[in-house]
Image (cartoon, rainbow, N blue to C red):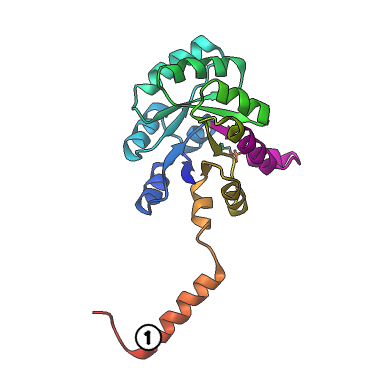
Amino acid sequence: MKFFADTADIDDIRKLAAANLVDGVTTNPSLIKKSGRDFIEAVTEIAGLVKGPVSAEVVATDHAGMMKEAERLRKIGSNIAIKVPLTPDGLMTCKALSGEGTMVNATLCFTANQALLAAKAGAAFISPFLGRLDDIGQPGIELIADIRLIYDNYDFATEILAASVRHPIHVLEVAKLGADVMTAPPAVIWQLFNHPLTDKGVESFLSDWKATGQTIA
Ligand code: G3P
């Protein structure tokens, strides 16, 4: 499973990249707001740092407007994936861009039928939002399972990009279901290392090692 960083914070991305923990990046208008950065500048910097897909979202709501914004965004680099909302105009844009060889990430997916539409429109990625479904009392994980089943039934090439991932259990569950990618805030990715027995084990090995009086030359 590929790991994408769900952030527009370049320092966080750099740290993950140093640990080989970032296969791509996803941004959205809220993350750009949080970063306080200029959108084009931030995405250009990220796309230069990370080799894998970097999602940049359009904000127009009509097809012509989305195409115009996508035109600007895809000039940033060949690893830019244009993020479009799962609306009729969004999927019309998806079809047009995918036909021209541009990666599209269909976002704000909350049903398996929406994911089916995105695959038929040639999306490179579908982004089902787990956490936001959990927030309203609908198990987000069931959506991932349904999409996996449908995409496998028809051999769709669209990659399942599990989004709105909030904690390590989400990561574990989507990995078990065979999501192709998961995108999570950097803090959640670092949390994957955590286990008290690992910390305890390191501590006791170090103390025993110290007692030997040896050094590794
Ligand atoms: O990848 C989509 C993500 O940014 C949304 O996450 O936590 O705002 O639902 P969240």
Residue 38 in picture, x, y percent from top left? 41, 29
Residue 190 in picture, x, y percent from top left? 49, 55
Q: Which residues are magenta?
A: 126-150
Q: Residue at x 38, y 51 (%)?
A: 20
Is ligand 1 less than 8 Å from the beta carbon at label 1? no
* Residue 4 drawn in magenta: no
The amino acid at mark 1 is Lys
Label 1 Cα crowd, 10 Å radius (few <14 / some 14-19 / many 20+): few
- Left or right of 1? Residue 140 is right
Quarter containing the C terminus: bottom left
In the rendered image, the residue lying farthest to the left is: 217
Q: Residue at x 35, y 52 (%)?
A: 18
The kind of secondary structure the magenta stretch mainly shows is helix
Q: Residue at x 37, y 85 (%)?
A: 210
* Quarter of the image where ligand 1 sits: top right
Q: Is residue 132 above or below residue 76?
A: below
**Residue bearing mark 1:** 210
Q: Is residue 8 visible?
A: no
Q: Is residue 43 above or below residue 101?
A: below
Q: Is residue 151 above or below residue 21?
A: above
Residue 42 in picture, x, y percent from top left? 39, 33
Q: Residue at x 56, y 45 (%)?
A: 178
- Left or right of 26? Residue 91 is right
**Could you say which is closer to the camera, residue 97 or residue 193?**
97
* Residue 136 drawn in magenta: yes
Secondary structure of the residue carrying numbered label 1: helix
In the rendered image, the residue lying farthest to the bottom is: 212
**Could you say which is closer to the camera, residue 154 or residue 184?**
154
Total numbered badges shown on the rendered structure: 1
- On the image, which quarter does residue 195 sit in? bottom right
